[in-house]
Amino acid sequence: MSQPNTPAASARAPRSLTGIKPTGMPHLGNYLGMIRPALEMTTSHQAYYFIADYHALTTLRSKELIQRYTTEVTAAWLALGLDPQKTVLFKQSDVPEVCELAWFLSCVTPLGLLKRAHAFKDAESKGTDINGGTFFYPVLMAADILAYDSDVVPVGKDQKQHVEMARDMAIAFNHYFGNVLRIPKPAIRPEVATIPGTDGRKMSKSYDNTIPLFLPTKKLRKAIMRIKTDSTPLEEPKNPETCSVFELYGLFATPDRVEDLAARYRAGGMGYGHAKQELFEVMEAHFAEPRDRFQHYLAHPEVINDILSDGGKRAKSVAATTLSRLRSAVGMESDLTMARK
């Protein structure tokens, strides 16, 4: 499928987009599965990264929490190295054009596609009270992706379906109305596709098994010491390939240190407590400086507000251009738009 032949699309660098819901402090799984690879991508792509506060409304019913979590998630991005001069960082709700774009997409999206969405099926299987926003979630997410002519979307393996659904919607819209929308691709790092939580399952707020970013030193160590391991005695050999502690260690330590720890696992004579201590030390070293920067940004919310405001204006300009293209394609140009032609 060819891409829209617009000057902006043909002349610019490839564009990446991703977002994170402000439903709590970002955790280790968010960082390794999405935030870190997204930050790495900013060196080679035009990056548009947003705080998904519209999406948060499907579960949050508190103005204060939405505002607090939005501030914390923004501070986390900045503390971890995002440069707002090079990356467009913004609130989803500062670009209401995505809601109109979502309506256009919903009109070419089969009901069956939405019923196959993992989040909807999971909520349905658990007997969760499902609202319209939960069911419509993939369409709004597709609008988020397509509004900025995104080329790639860095996501965890479990989020790949949302990008695939966005592709399906874009292809359907282009089929009916011409070559209007760019077709994005997911960018997945297989080695960190699924991050284990403290109980061995996928790290997730819904499982209450996360390790939040920027924990104070003592709380970080306490969280790591809670990681579930098997009952192999200290003196016996252990398999590093089946241990969550070792898996997390491998995502932070240098290759030679990883190899050394693996050898000690297999040799026996080392307990899981020793491995957890080494994981704590390497994580504490990794997050000490970002934790200080995070606290600095929280102490200066006016800086965060200025960054989000500027990013929102930049993002809105791009989304408005995309939406104008769609309105023209479906025959809904305003009198003002047609007068400029």
Image (tube, helix red, strand yellow):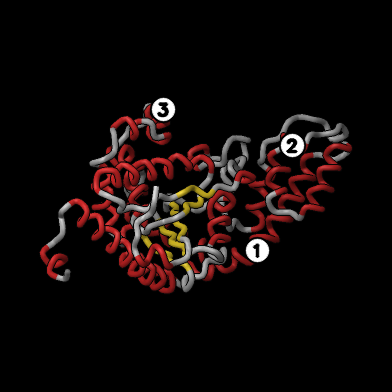
Separation (CA) of disc 2 from disc 3: 31 Å
Separation (CA) of disc 2 from disc 1: 28 Å
Q: Nearer the viewer, residue 96 or 25?
A: 96
Q: Which picture quadrant has residue 238?
A: top right
Q: Considering the numbered disc 1 on the image, is that residue within a helix, a strand or a loop?
A: helix
Which of disc 1 and disc 3 is earlier in sequence? 3
| Image marks 2 and 3: residues in contact by CB distance under 8 Å | no
Residue at x 30%, y 47% (from the top left corner): 174
Q: Is residue 95 above or below residue 314?
A: above
Q: Which residue is mark 1?
A: 288
Residue at x 33%, y 64% (from the top left corner): 318
User: Which is more foreground, mark 2 or mark 1?
Assistant: 2
Q: Which residue is mark 3?
A: 126
Separation (CA) of disc 3 from disc 1: 39 Å
Which of disc 1 and disc 2 is earlier in sequence? 2
Q: Considering the numbered disc 2 on the image, is that residue within a helix, a strand or a loop?
A: helix
- Quadrant that contains the C terminus: bottom left
Which of disc 3 and disc 2 is earlier in sequence? 3
Numbered label attached to residue 43: none
The location of residue 230, given as percent across then percent down, is 73, 31
Amino acid marked by disc 1 = Ala
The location of residue 294, given as percent across then percent down, is 54, 65
Amino acid marked by disc 3 = Lys
The location of residue 100, given as percent across then percent down, is 24, 52
| CA neighbours of label 2 inside 10 A, class few (<14), some (14 to 19), many (20+) | few
| Image marks 3 and 1: residues in contact by CB distance under 8 Å | no
Q: Which picture quadrant has residue 121?
A: top left
Q: Is residue 2 above or below residue 137?
A: below
Q: Is residue 330 left or right of residue 215?
A: left
Q: Which residue is mark 2?
A: 241
| CA neighbours of label 3 inside 10 A, class few (<14), some (14 to 19), many (20+) | few
